[in-house]
Image (cartoon, rainbow, N blue to C red):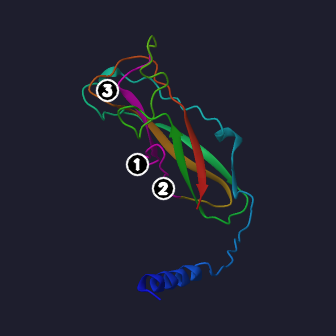
């Protein structure tokens, strides 16, 4: 037999062994449970009065904030506690200049007199910023009513702020930890 035939026979033997493979099993175990808490009816559609803020309080530089935060609360009603904490993630349309803040409704729309150069910054009760799409810090839960406190402020996104309505909408998701 020539060396070429010998190499071909050896290669065929090695390739045929690849056809013999071992298998196994993957088991998935879990449980479906009811949510440990529910969002109180009063917290399912919240309106936060932001008040009237003078243009001069925000004009001049990016990052200037309205002087008085608007506080709001999401109330969780907990019956059982297989989980001991919760975090809240807010989503919505991001501002074009400061993407972790909430854009005003109709911002930049032609023919609409919405305020320009301003967004809404969300924060926890201490004022620590919660960027859009990021979870808040953990709120400790107990049986019964659990108020999760937040605040919102107007924040300038550039040196010039124009006047007009300054409304926005955000959605929220509660994650149990």
Looking at the rendered image, the disc whose residue lies closer to the viewer, 2 or 3, is 2
Q: Which element type, helix, strand or loop, lies under badge 2?
A: loop
Residue where numbered disc 3 is placed: 57
Residue at the far front: name it: 1
Q: Position of residue 115 (x, y in %)?
A: 41, 20
User: Dot 2, crowdedness within 10 Å: few (<14), some or many (≥20)?
Assistant: some
Instruction: State whether the magenta stretch is mostly helix, strand or loop.
Output: loop
Q: Position of residue 117 (x, y in %)?
A: 35, 25
Residue at the image point whose x is 26% and y is 26% from the top: 159
User: Dot 3, crowdedness within 10 Å: few (<14), some or many (≥20)?
Assistant: some
User: Distance from label 3 to label 1 (Cα)?
Assistant: 20 Å
Residue where numbered disc 1 is placed: 128
**Quadrant including the C terminus:** bottom right
User: Distance from label 2 to label 3 (Cα)?
Assistant: 29 Å
Q: Quadrant of residue 15?
A: bottom right
Q: Is residue 22 above or below residue 68?
A: below
* Magenta stretch contains residue 126: yes
Instruction: Work out whether mark 2 precedes mark 1 in sequence or the reverse, and give the earlier one.
Output: 1
User: Residue 137 shows which numbered tag?
Assistant: 2
Q: How many marks?
A: 3
Q: Which residues are magenta?
A: 114-138
The answer to whether the residue labelled 2 contacts the one labelled 1, judged by CB atoms less than 8 Å apart, is yes
């Amino acid at each position: 037999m020539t060396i070429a035939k010998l190499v071909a026979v050896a290669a065929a033997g090695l390739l045929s062994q690849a056809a013999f493979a071992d298998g196994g099993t993957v088991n998935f175990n879990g449980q479906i449970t009811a949510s440990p808490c529910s969002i109180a009816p009063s917290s399912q559609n919240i309106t936060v009065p932001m008040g009237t803020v003078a243009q001069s309080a925000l004009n001049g530089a990016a990052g200037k904030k309205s002087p008085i935060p608007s506080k709001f609360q999401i109330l969780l009603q907990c019956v059982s506690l297989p989980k001991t904490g919760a975090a809240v993630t807010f989503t919505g349309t991001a501002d074009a200049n400061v993407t972790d803040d909430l854009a005003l409704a109709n911002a930049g729309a032609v023919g609409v007199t919405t305020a320009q150069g301003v967004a809404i910054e969300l924060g926890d009760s201490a004022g620590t910023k919660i960027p859009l799409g990021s979870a808040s810090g953990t709120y400790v839960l107990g049986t019964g009513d659990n108020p999760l406190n937040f605040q919102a402020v107007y924040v300038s996104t550039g040196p010039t702020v124009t006047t007009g309505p300054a409304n926005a909408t955000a959605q929220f998701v509660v994650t149990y930890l």
